[in-house]
Amino acid sequence: MPKKYLVAPRSQKCIGCMLCVLATSRYEKKKLGTKDSPITIKGKPSAYKIQIDYGDDLKFPEKIVQICPQNCFDTI
């Protein structure tokens, strides 16, 4: 099965809720918090920027796609 990658093609829709950051930390690192997450959100309201660390291998990118309330993410 080919490996899937998480991408954020609709990052301009981000509202900064950090659900993706917490979910990634929980599913991938087995921790609850924002410190060790491969996804970071920076910026200010109406101008958030989503950064994904592709050095970390995400095992469950589909879960991150599903948890985002603004549908910012896709898998390729």
Image (tube, grey):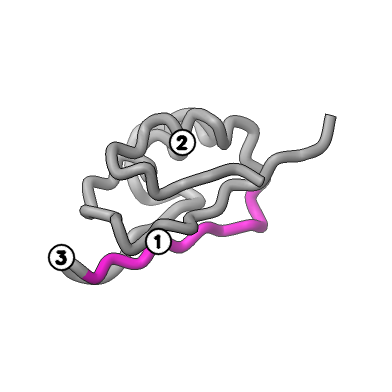
Q: Position of residue 32 (x, y in %)?
A: 35, 33
Q: Quadrant of residue 45?
A: bottom left
Relative horizontal placement of residue 48, taking residue 57 as reference (left or right): left
Spatial separation of the CA atoms under disc 1 and disc 2: 13 Å
Q: Which mark is residue 50?
A: 1
Q: Quadrant of residue 50?
A: bottom left
Q: Could you say whether the residue bearing mark 3 is in a helix, strand or loop?
A: loop
Q: Earlier in the sequence, mark 1 or mark 3?
A: 3
Would residue 54 be counted in the magenta stretch? yes
Q: Residue at position x 58%, y 47% from top?
A: 6
Q: Position of residue 73 (x, y in %)?
A: 46, 47
Q: Position of residue 21 (x, y in %)?
A: 37, 45
Disc 1: CA contacts within 10 A as few (<14), some (14-19) or many (>=20):
many
Q: In this picture, is 69 found above or below 30? A: below
Q: Could you say whether the residue bearing mark 2 is in a helix, strand or loop?
A: helix
Residue occupied by mark 3: 45
Q: Amino acid at mark 2?
A: Ile
Disc 2: CA contacts within 10 A as few (<14), some (14-19) or many (>=20):
many
Residue occupied by mark 2: 64
Task: Report the span colored magenta.
Answer: 47-56
Spatial separation of the CA atoms under disc 2 and disc 3: 21 Å
Q: In this picture, is 35 found above or below 3? A: below
Q: Could you say whether the residue bearing mark 1 is in a helix, strand or loop?
A: strand
Q: Residue furthest left?
A: 45
Closer to the camera, 12 or 31?
Answer: 12
Relative horizontal placement of residue 60, taking residue 21 as reference (left or right): right
Q: Residue at position x 60%, y 43% from top?
A: 75
Q: Amino acid at mark 1?
A: Ile
Relative horizontal placement of residue 41, taking residue 57 as reference (left or right): left
